[in-house]
Structures are given as structure tokens and as C-alpha cells.
Amino acid sequence: MKRDPVHLTTDVLVVGAGAAGMYAAIAASREGADVVLVDKSLIGRGGATIMAQMTVSAALGHQAPDDWTKHLADTLTAGRGLCDERLAAILCEEAVDRILEMDSWKVGWAREDGHMKQVTAPGHSAPRCVYVDFLNTGPAVARCLRGQVAKADSIARISGVAIIDLVLNDGVVSGAVGYNIEDGTPVTIAASAVVLAGGGLTGIYRRNSASANMGGHAYALALRAGARLIDMEFVQFFPIGHLAPRLVGMDPIMWDPFRYKLGGRLLNGQFEEFIHNYGAEDSGKYTAPRDVTSFAIVQENEAGRGSPHGGAWLSFEHVPEAELRTAFGPVIEKLLENGIDLTQQAIEVAPIAHYHMGGVQVDAHMETNIPGLYAAGEAVGGANGANRLSGNALPEAFVFGERAGRFAAAAVGGQTSAWDLKSAQAALEMLDARSGKETSFPSSGSAYQGLAAELRELMWDKVGLIRTEESLNEALIRIRAMQKELATASAPVAAAFDLSLADWYDLRDSLLAAESVALAAQRRSESRGAHWRADFPLTDPELAMNLTISLSGDGLETNWQEVGRR
Ligand SMILES: Cc1cc2nc3c(=O)[nH]c(=O)nc-3n(C[C@H](O)[C@H](O)[C@H](O)COP(=O)(O)OP(=O)(O)OC[C@H]3O[C@@H](n4cnc5c(N)ncnc54)[C@H](O)[C@@H]3O)c2cc1C
């Protein structure tokens, strides 16, 4: 049954309502623009933001003297020569304003002796990271921004709508096509500017810290609209994701804040410290960068010195119980409910896919190479280069979100969208074709779960922490075959809350994002930051360049580009 689209018109359309999207909406509305803020999930409750637990870096200098230029120097060092220095400088300088602004909105940053408490995280040269106790940073940030969004009359909030394609008119963005996930109704939105704030891609890996909707959607939307991506090969693996024993109802990366506050000892299967053998220092504190620690754990396992489940031991047994309880209060009780007594036992940890340094290429106004198309948050690439500092992702979402919304609204300046229904026709026809036909797949549940699971395995095994030319070629061949299988798969029977339709569109995006990561990783024949090629173990100074990716009629194309300097 063909359904007429529900049509909306606005000045600025924001796709994704995590921290970046909500901040973009707030900033655009402050500039006087009408905003439509759309999310596949509930506004402010999907994606990574609400999952974040602790660190938000900003050189406030409340704990100890600090300056944003020192934060920048640390960010550039972590980025291994590939940071877009202009974006990194904006991130570090404006993080301070955003943290103070959110403090005025009563987000609840932890305080000590009347000042904001700041802790030191790996790679930072000063105690620089604010947080909300106890492991509550993400929920507090999301609640605070939801509150500000709700206060603005000019922001229309739309939950449960997935954007499936952007619409361009004469090379300029003019809106988007989506559909209502609950009943499949098509939605068209005319907008003079669009901000892509759809988050990252770690959900395409088997072991990940992602929540729903982190399947590379913003990257795929950008590529199909003609925008360039940058640094796609750099996926950050968080070194100490929980591995064993079983942990129910708690986050797999919760050991990070434990280490910020309490240090802890990272030990191999023989209960020996090992990070110093890999060119870093950690003893009792928490200073080794994420890429070094991840590779060290993998190499200890390859050398037969892993923990029983294939990771490393993390021990807080030397920390007095009173100290544990002061630092983590109710969390200690939750751990005990899970049968974990940190005073008596070490737990096992191992790397998991956690964040993506790559993403949509933007200028200092957060605008892409497509006029009117902006991006913000984890969807953006370049600021963090080859490896992100702990605590830099949330400020990236706040700072880039605020800028994207502000500049998008200013550029619109009251102009109406160049919307033309004809330009949206292809996306609407595809949606219509995919809704309500006979299926060759089982008719209950989703038809595409098998393919999605296969993609996650493939990315983990072939495009994961350790890559080779052979593994990357195998991945590319299979990803491209899966794209063909998906394109020709017959559409499922129409149903309310059609999981197959949602999964089909998710998988279309994820396969394109996966192909971009695998292709960029194949082209970068060196090891640098989070990208480790077993067949090219050294860093090649000649490759201190960024790799961009765009989509043409012939498929994905890569180009080397000079690193942006200040
Ligand atoms: C478990 C975890 C812990 C973390 N801890 C920290 C930390 O302590 N400190 C730190 O700095 N960083 C941390 N990070 C990283 C940080 O949280 C993210 O980088 C940041 O929140 C990204 O914000 P965002 O707004 O760009 O994206 P997200 O918060 O992921 O929001 C993206 C939104 O877009 C929506 N969306 C996606 N595609 C579409 C579409 N096609 N149509 C409509 N909507 C769409 C999603 O539903 C989602 O709500 C953590 C991440 C995770 C996963």
C-alpha cells in the first residue's frame, strides 16, 4: 500500500539527538532559527551520549593551573600527527565555555572544596576531566540538554523517525527523507540547512561498547549525499572493556572511571605488570594511552600470557574497601550483587570497539563540502587524528554541536529551502518498494539479523585491532558481496513496527560505513595510533597525511590530503 509522506518544513534539520544534536538544536534556536530535531530513538535517550560515564576534558584550571593550549598539545600528541589542528584547537578552546555553560544549566559537575573537581586521564598533562558522580556523566548531560531543548519553543522534537537519505537540489542540501519506525509512514522534511549528528559506528563490531543506532548512519548519509569522509581507518578500541566474570546491568567500560580515581593494576595471565614492555608506563596509576594498552593486551595473549578468557587481569585488591566505597558508593553494591568483590578478586578485561576518530570532513564552521550540510559530534572526523584522548569525545559533541547549529542558522538567515519533491522521489520510491511485498525470508522478526551478525564478526576478525592486506581484502570482498545480497533481497511483508525494514536500512548504512573503514585501512600501509597493520608494523613518516573517502558512480574513492595546520 502506497502511503503519502508526512511533510514538514523548517530552517534547520538536525539528524540525531545525542549531545551534539541537542546542542546544535539549542544553538540554532538561539540564533532565531526554527529547528526540527529528529532521532530514531527517543530524543536524548539514544546513541552514545547517555552511556558515557565519566570524563569530560576541558582546561578549566580549577584543580590545578591549566590552559587550553596545553590541552591542544596533548590532543595533537595523541593524534600521532594526523589531527586537523584547526578543529583540535576549536575543540580545546571552546570546551571551557561549553562546560561552564552546562554548569550554569545545573548539569551537576562534581565539586570539591567549592570548585569543579577535575581528574587526570591517560594522555592528559594536567587534572582536566570533569564528571558527574557516580558514573552518571552521560545521563546527567543528556538530562541537562533535554531540559534546554524542551524550553525552546522553536525546536520541534521528533522521536522514532529514521532519516534514510538526504535530499539535494542543484548540489545544495534541501532536506531529507525518513520514515516513522512504528508504522512505516514516509516523512519528508524540507530544510535550508541540515546538521548530521547521527553518532559513530562501533556497533558494526562484534565486541563493542555501543548502544542502539551506532551503525555508521551519519557517515553513510553523508557519503550518499556527496560529502567527503576523513580518517575512516581509525577505530578506537577501548583497552579495558569488561570480559569476565559475567556482569549484568552494568556498562562494559565502567572500569575506566575506576582507574581514573583509583589507579588499579593491569596484569597479564601470570599476574605481572606488562605495559612497560610496550614503551608506556602505568604502574598503579593510569597513564598509558588507549592504543598502546589495547595492542599490549593483544600481544600478551598472542605470546600465551593472557588471562583465562583472552584478556588481562585488572586488580583493585590493594585498594582499601573504604576508599572503594568513597569513590564509587552505590556502584560497589551493584558489583556485589553481580558476585564481584573487588577487595577479594581481580576481574578480566579486554579491548572493545569504543569510538571512531574518523568521520565527515568539515571546515571550521562544521560545514561539509556540500553547501548547507553540516556535521557535529562523533559523526565528524579529523579533530582527534589517529587516536583520541580520553574525555575528548563529549566536549567534541558539545563544541561542534554548538558551532554547527549556530553557523547553520546564521547561514540560513531566513532563506527558504530549495525543496523540490522530485529530488526526493528516488528515496521515496525505494522506501515504497521495500514496504509491503512478499518475502523470501522468515516473516516474523527481522530478516536481516543474520547478515548484521555476520558483518559484526567480519569487522572484528578482519578489520579489527590487527589488520593485514590479506584480511582487509577478504573483508572488502565479503562486504561488497553482502551489499549486493542486500540490494536484491526481496522486501518483507508490511507490518506495524517492521523490524526487517528498519534492519534493511540500518544494514545498508552499516555496510557502506564498514566498506569505508576497510578500504581506508587497506590503503594505509603503516601502523599509526589506533590503526595497526601486522604487515606494516612501523609508522611511515611519508604517510603523515589524511585519507579522504567519497562516493562516486564507480563506488568509493580515496584521496591523500595534507594535514590541516593552524
Ligand atoms: C559506553 C560509552 C562510554 C563513553 N564514555 C565517554 C566518556 O566518559 N567521556 C567522553 O568524552 N566520551 C565518552 N564516550 C564517547 C561519547 O559518549 C560519544 O562520542 C558522544 O556522546 C557522541 O555524541 P553524539 O551526539 O555525536 O552521538 P550520539 O550520542 O551517539 O547520538 C547520535 C544520535 O543519532 C541518532 N541517529 C543515528 N542515525 C540516525 C538516523 N539515520 N536518523 C535519526 N536519528 C539517527 C541515534 O539514535 C542517536 O540518538 C563514551 C561512549 C560510550 C559508547
Image: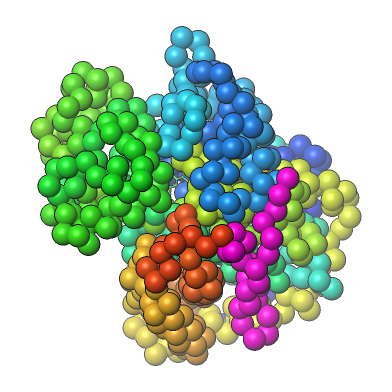
Give yes or no for residue 57 being in the magenta stretch: no
**In the rendered view, would you say 3 is above or below 238?**
below
| Count of picture labels | 0
Residue 545 or residue 520, whichever sits in front: 545
Q: Which residue appears at 76% of the width and 65% of the height?
A: 370
- Which of the 4 image quadrants contains residue 153? top right
Could you tell whether 351 is left or right of 337 in the image?
Answer: right
Report the front residue among 139 and 297.
297
Residue 268 visible to the viewer = yes
Identify the residue at image location x=17%, y=42%: 272
**Which range of residues does the magenta coloring cover?**
542-566
Q: State which quarter of the image contains the N terminus.
A: bottom right
Residue 461: x and y, percent?
33, 71
Say whether residue 83 is left or right of residue 310: right
Residue positioned 76% across, 37% down in the render: 30
Scheme of image coloration: rainbow
Q: Which of 531 and 131 is in front in this view?
A: 531
| Quadrant of the frame with the C terminus | top right
Residue 490 left/right relative to 376: left
Q: Which residue lies furthest to the top in this view?
A: 113
- Above or below: residue 195 compared with residue 489: above
* Residue 123 locus on image (x, y percent): 46, 38
Residue 65 pos. (x, y %):
56, 18
The reply to whether residue 41 is in sight is: no
Residue drawn at (39%, 54%) of the image: 237
* Residue 113, position as x, y percentages in the image: 46, 9
